[in-house]
Image (tube, rainbow, N blue to C red):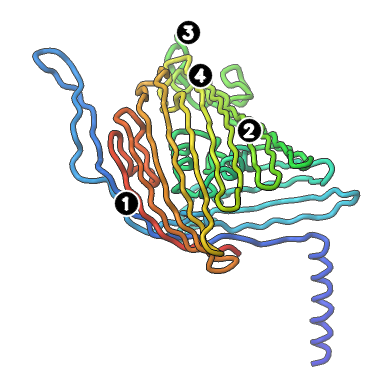
Amino acid sequence: MQKKLIALAVASLASGAAFAQTNVTMYGIADAGYIYSSGDPGFVQRPVVINGVPGVARVSIPGTNTFSGISSGLLSGSRLGFRGEEALGNGLKAIFTLEYSLNIDNNTGVGYSGSSTGLNARQQFVGLSSASLGTLALGRQYSPGYQATSNNDPAGGAAFEPQSFLTNQAGYTITPNTPARWNNAISYTTPNWGGFSAKAIYSFGESSVTTAMVPAAFPVASAAVVGTYNDKLVSITDNSAYGVGVNYANGPLNLDAVYQGRSSTNKVDTFNGFDTNEWYVGGSYDFKMVKLMGSWQGMSVDNTQFAQNVFQDSQVWQVGAVIPILAASNIHLGYSQLMWDGSSRALARLTGNSQSAMAGWTTNLSKRTTFYAGYVWTQNDNNSIGTAPVAGVGARGQDNNTVLAGLRHMF
């Protein structure tokens, strides 16, 4: 018995020495709630001929667009993560983060059996970090727009918050949603200089063309062609993305400015050849009795050719407030509007707007567990994309009402 105790003690000391060299932390969030989202299904446009003259008629769709069920990650995306660091000397550290998305409402998650793409990563990167020199990282990472939009969002980037789902469904990468996570990326984050910090990122396209529509100037116009990496039909910058963000956080004041761009997916393809530029400015101020915030962002799409895509020039602005109630509760208020300018040469020009307002409630039941509830109203103009907190439920020309309640536990 005494020998077994000695062996266990030696094993624990050896294990402790190993963990002292590389400090690894496991963390995560389990978040799920009930959500009900409903509205009229809107209309479809169908060709008609009246007195021999062709035209277009709007035909109402019967029934309702409704979702009722349990959804994962309403307030914060459910996840399982590991992060670690190892001291290399002279203030330099090796760091890594492996963070994977979970849908705890159904049988999907990290490496689930039905996955066709393997792990469902939110982040996975490795890098070097120094308090005086900053951080260099390689892998799948957040673009600067992710943190900026979360900083100035009354619900912290929750899936049901208006600015969050409007930007996501309108094709923005400056959003607190999945499009703000970039693959094949290299990033540099500066140290904090008296409240100022900055981040720059570049995501390599690493793509080739398998088929393409060749412009008429080519001898085999409109024929399928095969491309390879970095050949004359594929630029090395195709499908790449780049961005830079600046943040100032000092006491109650927070300010963010971000620029992000995407290069053409394939410049020889007349149906997908476009570049995109995005800008964002936002800020918040905590008056203790209420925290106020607001932001404006725009997206410019270079549709120089006849582009068959929904990405068009647009703007999104939002205002919000967080009001502390009692010791552990908050009221969250937000309003946002998505405005299309209709200047695109895409097949379906968008000129209508979408607007949405949210009223939410959070109560901290403990340091790790939060109850939340909310109501979201959304209105879509006739010539809009038809948005709602639940993708696919919103319809052009229709209002949508959404109610939800759930529980978030962090560990």
Q: Earlier in the sequence, mark 3 or mark 1?
A: 1
Neighbor class of circle 2 (other Cα within 10 Å; few <14, some 14-19, many 20+) is many
* In this rendering, the label closer to the viewer, 2 or 1: 2
* Cα distance between the residues tagged 2 and 4: 22 Å
Q: Nearer the viewer, mark 3 or mark 2?
A: 2
Image position of 213 with respect to 261: above or below: above
- Residue tagged 3: 219
Q: Nearer the viewer, residue 404 or 154?
A: 154
Where residue 70 appears, x then y in whole percent? 39, 59
Kindly identify which residue carries mark 2. 257
Tell me if label 2 and label 1 are in contact, CB under 8 Å. no
Name which of mark 2 and mark 1 comes first in the sequence. 1
Residue kind at label 4, given as amino acid type? Asp
Which of the two labelled residues, at mark 3 and mark 2, occupies the earlier sequence position?
3
Give me the C-alpha separation between circle 3 and circle 2.
Answer: 47 Å
| Residue hosting label 4 | 302
Q: Secondary structure at mark 2?
A: strand
Mark 3 vs mark 1, CA separation in Å: 51 Å
Q: Furthest residue to the right?
A: 90
* Residue that mark 1 sits on: 67
Which amino acid, by three-letter code, is at mark 2?
Ala
**Quarter that holds the N terminus:** bottom right
Three-letter amino acid code at the position of disc 1: Phe
